[in-house]
Structures are given as C-alpha cells and as structure tokens.
Amino acid sequence: MSVSFSEKRSKRILTIKLALSAPPYATVNHNPIFNGVGLAVETYPYYNRVTNRLDFSRLLAAFHNAPNGSIMVLHACAHNPTGVDPTREQWNAIADVIIEKGHFAFFDCAYQGFASGDLDQDAWAVREFARRGIPMLVCQVGHRISLWLQSSNDS
C-alpha cells in the first residue's frame, strides 16, 4: 500500500528539515511556501556582520550538524540580502558536505547575471553541483528579466 504526500503530511510522517540562510530575507517568500506544505524551516548562519563576509566556518558546521537528508536552500549568486557569495573553493566544500550528509540542494537563482554580469559565471555553482551528481532543484524567476530593444531606425 502506498501513502500519498498529503497522507504523510496529514499524519505528520513527513519529517524533512529545510534550512534557509540567515539573515533570512528569503523567509518573506520562502517560509509561507515551505510551511504551507508542512516542511519545518530552520536557518543556518551565513553572514558575519562584523567582518561583512561569508561566515563560512559556521555555515559548514551547520550543514554538518543538520539532520541527514535536509533540504538546503542556497542562493546560486548575489545572495539576498547580503550580496556575499561563496568562492568556488567554498562551493566545492559545501558540495562535499551535501554529498556526505545526503542533503538536497534547493537553488534560488533569482539574480543570475546580476552578480557578475555574466550568466555563465553566475551559474557556476549550479553547474558544479550538477556535474557532481548532487540531487537538486533550481528555481529561477523571469519577472526580473528585462530586454532592451532598439530598432535600426533609432539613432
């Protein structure tokens, strides 16, 4: 006998943990969605307000300490609201922990192209996770994209 997602949720069998970075600007958007489907939402350290840098050691420790199989919400680039992104070496260390712990990567990729001005560079983390076979979901919104058109008749 199979049990549907809604049956699991109604019976509180679903115990998946989902972690958002702190400061949790994204909680305005993410929390109602994730809470609405019964996911327990927690935060992990991300930004050090004293150094104005990524709080990498605390972030990595939180990923290590999260229950196996947690969903880790990651900003692929242009972390909102800090604008601070991991280096490629840090992304690789994050990927190592996600693999080790069996976590699931949930990439919020709302600002691809805005961090560096290069779509390919801003997609590096997502592509690296894919290359390494890490289970993931990538969300990208189109309402932030605008297009400048100029006809050949314009001066």
Image (tube, rainbow, N blue to C red):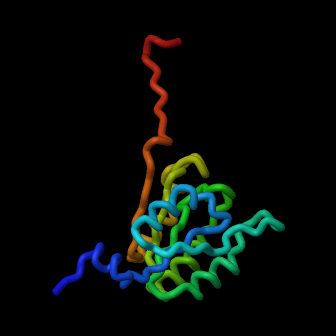
Q: Please identify the quadrant where the N terminus is shown.
A: bottom left
At x 54%, y 84%, the residue is 97
Query: Could you say which is closer to the camera, residue 30 or residue 143?
Result: 30
Residue drawn at the location 50% of the way across and 42% of the way down: 144
In the figure, is residue 76 to the left or right of 151?
right
Tell me which corner region of the image, top left, top right, bottom left or bottom right, holds residue 127.
bottom left
Q: Residue at x 57, y 61 (%)?
A: 27
- Considering depth in this image, is 126 or 45 the residue closer to the camera? 45
The correct choice, above or below, for 78 with respect to 104 in the image is above
Note whether 28 is above or below 36 in the view shown. above
Q: Quadrant of residue 37?
A: bottom left
Task: Pinpoint residue 55: horizontal percent, then vertical percent.
Answer: 71, 73
Q: Position of residue 65 (x, y in %)?
A: 59, 88
Question: In this figure, what is the number of numbered marks?
Answer: 0
Residue that sits furthest to the right in the current view:
50
Q: Position of residue 48 (x, y in %)?
A: 76, 69
- Report the side of 7 relative to 148 (left or right): left
Q: Say left or right for 17 vs 78.
A: left
